[in-house]
Image: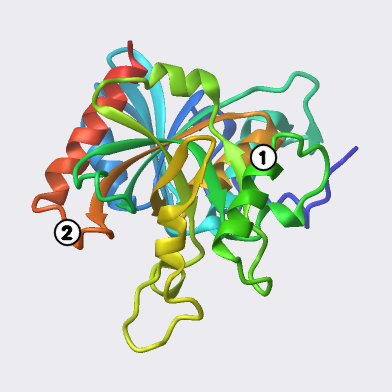
Amino acid sequence: MRIAESELILNPDGSIYHLHLLPEDLADTVITVGDPDRVNLISARFDTMEVIKQHREFRSHTGTYKGKRLTVLSTGIGPDNIDIVCNELDALVNIDLKNRSVKRDLRSLEIIRVGTSGGLQPDVEVDSIVSGTIGIGFDNLLHFYGGDMEFLDHDFANAFISHTKWNPDNSKPYVVHADEGLLARFSSEDIRPGITTTNVGFYGPQGRVIRLPLHDADMNAKIASFEHRGQKITNLEMETAAIYGMSKMLGHKALSLNIILANRANGTFSVNPHKAIERLITKTLDILVQ
């Protein structure tokens, strides 16, 4: 079936609408970051560079690191941008852009988020690396999609909703597991497995008060005290669950790695966030080329 021009928008050069990438620009392994400047931090380590493109907040560099071809892409902040990025990455590999039709043989990408995050448990120290075994989405992105969603962990979500006395006016949280193969590859003594919540904002949705009061001032404490199957929620950020959900639906493999810059339980912040981020980048790249 042909996909209409209004649904799959291409630029005059044939590149995908927002990312401005062509199919040949994309590697099989994609590192996503929120901050466009972090793309440069990663690609500065590449041995070769073949693609440098940017449109709005979406900066893309493709090159090789120790012989492995990689794409580094900035998503900007929030689940709405993840909807754009994941759909357009998938279109680049699984849609014949000239004929506007789905390819017979589908390709699966490895998508590794390298991000920053806030810790919710006192023992999740600043500058530690957390791999998200599970993403809990507070956004409503996945609720707009249909099809097979057997990957959603409804038991976990319902337990979380009950424990936190979740506001029914908010979107219903969804729970998605990371790709098991990538989790196994990134199993390391200095990477802590944890559960990551994906929030829809930085201030109120993450329990910060500047001038506006919160609907539930105890929400972060409720989230931190939640335990299910012997697991607690370790950290919060704004992209992980959306990446996991979109990747599962589209047949890609995803894992989120976060450096903890702030510990919300202790009120502490990294004294050298740049150094901490550099350590996460080094660890990620070294494991990817093993």
Residue 268 tag number: 2
Work out which quarter of the rendered image holds the C terminus and state it.
Answer: top left
What residue appears at the point 61 percent right and 45 percent down from the top-left corner? Answer: 175
Residue 88: tell me if it is visible. no
Query: Quick one: SS at disc 1?
Result: loop
Task: Name the foreground residue: 192 vs 2.
Answer: 192
Residue underneath mark 1: 153
Vertical arrangement, residue 213 with respect to residue 37, above or below: below
Circle 2 Cα neighbour tier, 10 Å, few/some/many (<14 / 14–19 / ≥20): some
Do residues under tags 2 and 1 come within 8 Å of each other at their CB atoms? Answer: no
The residue lying at 27 percent from left, 14 percent from top is: 66
Alpha carbon distance from label 2 to label 1: 32 Å
Identify which residue, 96 or 219, lies in the foreground: 219
Question: Which label sits on residue 140?
Answer: none
* Residue 165, picture quadrant: bottom right
Three-letter code, disc 1: Asp
In this rendering, does residue 258 appear at all? yes
Crowd around label 1: few <14 · some 14–19 · many ≥20 (10 Å): some
| 89 w.r.t. 160: above or below | above
Pick the residue in front: 176 or 220.
Answer: 220
Left or right of 138, for residue 97: right
Q: Is mark 2 on a helix, strand or loop?
A: strand
Q: Whole-percent x and y of residue 29?
A: 47, 25
Q: In which quarter of the image is the N terminus?
A: top right
Residue type at the position of mark 2:
Thr
